[in-house]
Image (cartoon, coloured by chain):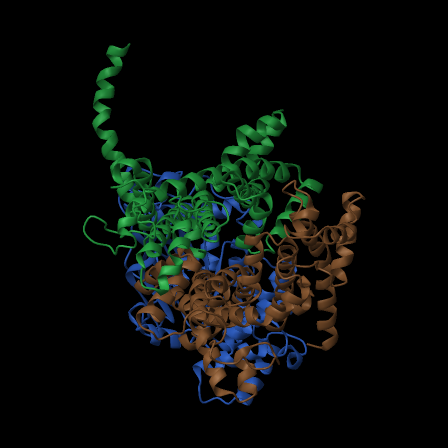
Amino acid sequence: MTAPHGGDTLTALLDVRDLHTHFIARDLDNKVRTARALNGVSFSLAPGRILGLVGETGAGKSLTALSVLGLLKPPARIVGGQAFFEGRDLLALPPDELNALRGSRIGLVVQSPKTSLDPLARIGAQLVRLQRAHRPALSAAEAEARAVEILASVGIPDPQRRLRAWPHELSGGMAQRVLIAMALVNEPALLIADEPTTGLDVTVQAQILDLLRAMALARGIGAVIITHDLGVVAHYCDEAAVMFAGQVVEQGPVGPLFARPAHPYTRGLIAATPERLTLRAQRPTGSPPNLYALPEGCLYRDRCPIAEARCATPPPLVALPEGHVASCHFASTDAAA
Amino acid sequence: MSDLALPGAAAAAPSWPSRAAARLAGISRRSPTLAIGAAIILGFAVLALFATWIAPENPVASNPARVLQPPGPGIWFGTDGNGMDVLSRVIHGSLYAFGIAIPVVIVALLLGVPVGLWTGWSGGWPDEIVMRGSDALRVFPSIILALAVVAAAGPSLLNVVLVLGLLDAPIFARVVRAEVLALRGGTFVEAAVAAGNPTRRILFRHILPNALRGAMAQTAVRAAWAVRISATLAFLGVGIQPPTPEWGAMIRQGAEYMVTGEWWVAVFPGAALILMVLGLNMLGDGLADLLDPRRKAATR
Amino acid sequence: MSAATIGRFLARRALLLVPLLIIVSFLCFMLVRISGQDPVAMLAGPTATAAEIELVRTSLALDQPLWAQFLVWLGNVLQGDLGRSWLSNRPVLAELLDRAPATLELLLYGVGLGALIGIPVGLKAAQRPDGTFDQVSRFLSLLGFSTPTYWLGLVMLFVFFYLLDWAPPGMGRISLMVDPPPHITGSYLWDSLLQGRQEAAASAAAQLVLPVICIAIISAAPIIKQTRAIALEVLSSDFIRYARGQGLPARDVRRMVLRNSMVPVVTFVGTELAGLVGTTALIEYVFAWGGVGQYGLTAIIQGDFAAVQGYVLMLAVFSVLVFLVVDLAVMMLEPRAGARA
């Protein structure tokens, strides 16, 4: 599972290859226990495209984003892999160079926007601080003018006045718009949105996702939207990468992937999603494998309805038509069926 | 039957101590604080239990021939103003520290746990009254409150224990009440209620054991408080009086010598007091970490 | 934040404190009754004459039920009558007010210094939990928790007065050889400075050093522990994680941690200030400071119950006032509190 899925380093905006992240801690008996949370995540994103990273809770979606951005905290540790962004391996960059990329070349939108804003700084001050952190030459007045402009562009009414607002005065949807403004204010090339609509009202969710997609398209930037909601992927993304137990088991353009899912897990997900709306209510049967004692071979084996003896060996990466790939022993034969 | 059981027991016997030892080693590596604290308290317990045999002399035997002798061979901690051996007095002092701390914690548990159980379970006005009352008590510094109440009630040893226990009880009541409140909404209590268990049975069978866990984690820290406050009372001359070999009372005796150079009379009992309180606090911190590992990251 | 907002806030807070103060004063009232002895005898003291006993008896309304006695007592207290000390035969309130500045000075400098040490140490310890600095500071903090205040004071006197002769003896607030300055603020140090009396100022300052250091050491221990816990919580908050995700420089993130830790730290130091009155009393006792703490302890030891009641009540009122000031400070520091008030 080392080959990149679709695209290559030269043309891809973000190319994650065989990323391994483990949680290493000691238990009560002082034995070292390792939870293998990411087991060779690979996916790639072309400039100007929107990728939906989808999977159940615990599949490692957010962890993938944190690993790529260098935001892991002990006991989590990257033990292998590469993540090329604009040709540079993020995982090999010195911390301060990576820090300089975050918030400028790579914008981040997180869940729980209300608790993610500094409670003791006004919105305008936070936007100005972020710009001047990455562009010290910028004057305070210029940064403030830009802040007004970006707030207006994410659909915040009366942006001039909003600069003076405290985070606790914003609604959840408004706070998420501010976060999107902060992610975009330094004109990034890549936007990573981690569950950007969790905790928001359903009507607001659609507005935020519409906004995210419109902003990404208008600026021609690549975006990764992390979600557990297949409906979000189907409606707002160009590409989908399906994660299970710390691996991307299938990636491809949304059309072919939904029409001809090649991995049994993806098929299970789609089948379990009434009218392809949400994953939360019904999941494919069974629970994710124990990360402390992963099985050999295909990690989906124990839950897979079509598993055979050969699934005890690592599944091959099968290339399908239209840039669609899946890692399954049955991928080529089943895709046609 | 015993014939059949024996081989199995014999096989298990050697592995049990080694497993326990491994577990102990694991705990002490995970929480050295707990291990050091436990070791200190164990040391003091040995001193207290075998004081008569360990102490070289009778702690209250005065000897006018060797008043205020500095530490030296034979009298390792020196002698006090009555010519009594400071080392022997410090060793016997551990008996008083335990003798006050343990009853105080027991009194506090006996008062606080039922009150916490009752107020947490019933809620309403009893809860309101008890909680507001204990809020009001927190307005006073605990040392002053303990002193004033002991002095007013009459400074006997029994009163010291009762008052300190009484003042300590709200802390246990709060802990137990919080646990009860958290458990009351829990599914297993709901299930027990649905299964038609009487309240008393639910309280004692299901809630009490869980609530006690939280209270138990506090006992060491509260014992440290009791040792500290009771010594303070004795230092001020309220409660235990010299020449009883109690550490606080010994510091009181030695206070005047600190500005004339005979430091050993007050320094050694003070050091013993610090070590014991430190041991109890370390034990308490370690217990809290171990019983609630989440706390280790976030708080204290 | 307008004056009207602050006024409304204070009024609301003060109203909430009324029930607390009533319970507290009831506890003080009950103090002389828990022994089962005649409260009149306890309040009037062993040296009282028959006339004095009769005076106390009438002022207590002892022929009426307990709640009525309490109301009479509370009425006296509200009029500033806390009774008379039988030791000095002076009104308790006047004695307490005379001595308050001395204690307040000690307490504020001590806790101020303790916060000045404890807050930076706690913040630094939180930067690398379980690092060497953290482990050492945690042990020192535990040691501070476990050290008896009065013993620390005695050891300080032994080392710095007897052995090294760097500090004056622990005999009050100013050298016996120096005349205390006339009363302006009640603080010998400030009164001397205000009147340009350098010798008196130097003596007053020298007397302050050891007791202030003792209180600072004792108060720094819990401040270190609590600041560390607060900073760790802020460090693990969503907004700090997001700030890192935005690539803010370490300096900006540190400033954010500091600012966001300040509100709970200020609250904690405030509550400490109220609790450390007990510690201060013991330090006063050891250094013969002559403040309210020493007065209160002496009253307790000698069984001067009118003074004890007054002292305990004063401490409670002081705590309540401190909590009020802390609330006000939090309101100034915290934009959300203004909305809630």
| Residue drawn at x 47%, y 85% as measured from the top left | C199
User: What number of labels is visible?
Assistant: 0
Q: In which quadrant of the rendered view does residue A242 lie?
A: bottom left
Q: On the image, which quarter does residue B128 sit in?
A: top right
User: Chain in brown?
Assistant: C
Quarter of the picture containing the C terminus of chain A is: top left
Q: Tell which chain the image draws in blue.
A: A
Query: Residue C319: horizontal and vertical position, in percent?
Result: 61, 61
Relative to A98, is C340 on the left or the right? right
Q: Would you place residue A330 above or below residue C265 in this image?
A: above
> Which tint is chain B?
green
Q: Is residue C226 above or below residue C7?
A: above
Name the quadrant containing residue A198. Answer: bottom right
**Residue B68 point in image, percent of width and height:** 30, 55
Res A51 visible: no
Give percent across and percent down for residue A323.
38, 61
**Who is closer to the viewer here, C122 or C31?**
C31
> Measuring 37% from the left and 69% from the top, which residue is drawn there?
A14
Q: Is residue A233 visible?
A: yes
> In screen coordinates, is A102 left or right of C107?
left
Query: For this rendering, which residue is in front, C311 or A91?
Result: C311
Where is residue C62? Give x, y as percent: 77, 46
Nearer-the-camera pick, C229 or B251: B251
Q: Answer above or below: position of A295 versus A191.
A: above
Give left or right: position of A294 versus C275. left
Specify the quadrant that holds the N terminus of chain A.
Answer: bottom left
